[in-house]
Amino acid sequence: MRMQVQPGPIMRLPLFLLIWGVAALSMLLPSIHALVRDNHDVSRAFFYSSILGVFVVAMIGLSLGARRPRYGSLGQLLSLLGTFSVLPVFLAVPFHDALQTTSFLNAYFDMVSAITTTGADLFPDFTRLDPSLHLWRAQVGWMGGLVMWIAASAILAPLSLGGFEVTARGEPGRAVKSSVQSDVVDPRRRLLQVTATLTPIYVGLTGVVWILLMMSDERALTALCHAMSVMATSGISPVGGMTGAQAGVAGEVVLFLFMFFALSRLTFSSDTVARGYSRLDKDPEFRIGLLIVVSIPALLFLRHWVASFEVDAPEDPVLALRALWGSLFTVMSFLTTTGFESADWEEARQWSGLGTPGIILMGLAVIGGGVATTAGGVKLLRVFALYLNGLREMERLVHPSSVSGVGAGHRRIQKDGAFIAWVFFMLFALSLAVITLALAYLGSGFEQSMVLAIAALSTTGPLIDVVGEEPIQLISLGAGAKAVLCAAMVVGRLETLAIIALITPDLWRN
């Protein structure tokens, strides 16, 4: 008979408390970074906050003792909500203390933006922040991405949330043998197993990106921040994005290749598909993502030739290639909700003849990346489910008595997947309308409110800087508007179905 290994006393603590403790210990990294640079004020701010956080977590942990949590996965989902809404209060303490030239509300907003992997830039003048603060922002975004990576499999999948409500066999480990079924059913044990499995992958991939960027002549701090940002799809940069990077096209190629991990979970795992259909080239999310990444830059590229056909303008092949690459990188970046803008994007805009192609970038961000990845947005799998339903409805118009058959490539979608996806789309649209109206009521223009709402709900903060003719100055918004955006970023990260699950009394009673 197999013996059950019980979690230690630390692992029996509430999930939110454990995340708080890890966040407190992680403050030592920017503290050491500032100490090496002889910036003792910033170093002390992070060091004292780390000690204070560890002390508070230890005292609360001792007071709880061996008390076990009453709720399983739903309680963990509540801890996840606290991580994205309450924990930034603590994360903002060293940031506010070290910067000293902004309000605590601005510091809290910036930490919510980072941990939800939104990456909305409250301080457009990146020279205003100390390099250690840039490291902290990227690090918080990276940790937020890791939390979502783990939570997708350990928390959202068992509750059929986060896109798993569309999949046919979305819960990791559902097909395990009965001898280990108790390990899978226990929410805490499942969380420990998923954490132990995914954390080394996440850390290892980040390290590979960091090394490749430094090999491309990128500065160490910039390379590390960009590596963290591309894995978490946060788009946080200490140099203002790709235009301030030294790696050039080589660095963009590295980031472009690793953005594929946000298109589909099958790039690193096969636990969201039916058995025997885990090939990446058969994955609908990956194929739709590739179709979008190839087709939109091609259309923008061809638009130039159509416009210049009548005037017979001379062409520069090098300029054409730069424009094509700028479109390709930027489309991939915003589809994965990373939000990095290629250094050649301006050239691509002029080449295509589109002065402000913001509606294209907003549409890409709304579509988003793959299920169970760090990307935000609606998710490609839901789009695919609606696409299949549309094909079926058109088939029924032509052949009303036809019987639909499920092909091998469609077995990832459950029977009612299209209906559930449509419900999510309606909830997303309703959330977008409510947030837009709230921001407009608080003084923002309608167009500005729409851009801010889409950027927050899709967790693609850089949209705010690239969509319109002029970037939106977030720091000039009122306290009410910033509070609305903070709530929108949390809703966009957890998704509306998860929020509804948390406020449903029947689920708590069961």
Image (cartoon, helix red, strand yellow):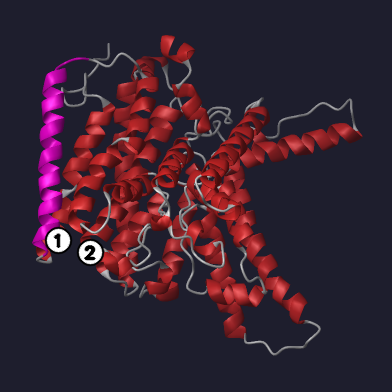
Magenta stretch: residue 64 in it? yes
Residue under the image location 63 percent in, 58 percent down: 359
Q: Amino acid at mark 1?
A: Ala
| Residue 193 image-quadrant placement | top left
Nearer mark to the viewer, of 1 and 2: 2
**Mark 1 crowdedness (10 Å alpha carbons): few <14, some 14-19, many ≥20:** many
Q: Is residue 308 above or below residue 384?
A: below
Magenta stretch: residue 288 in it? no
Question: Where residue 184 sits in the image (x, y, percent)?
Answer: 37, 21
Quadrant of image for the C terminus: top left
In the shown orientation, is residue 446 left or right of residue 397? Answer: left
Q: Is residue 31 above or below residue 417?
A: below
Question: Where residue 317 sits in the image (x, y, percent)?
Answer: 62, 84
- Nearest the camera: 232 or 153? 232
Q: Which residue is mark 1?
A: 34
Residue 93 visible: yes
- Residue 130 numbered mark, or none: 2
Q: Amino acid at mark 2?
A: Asp
Q: Are marks 1 and 2 in contact (CB under 8 Å)?
A: yes
Question: Where residue 315 sits in the image (x, y, percent)?
Answer: 67, 87
Residue under the image location 31 percent in, 60 percent down: 225
| Chain-order first, disc 1 or disc 2 | 1
Question: Where residue 37 sits in the image (x, y, percent)?
Answer: 13, 66
In the shown orientation, is residue 338 left or right of residue 59? Answer: right
Q: Is residue 131 above or below residue 22?
A: below
Residue 412 visible: no
Q: Which residues are drawn in magenta?
A: 39-67
**Mark 2 crowdedness (10 Å alpha carbons): few <14, some 14-19, many ≥20:** some
Secondary element at image label 1: helix
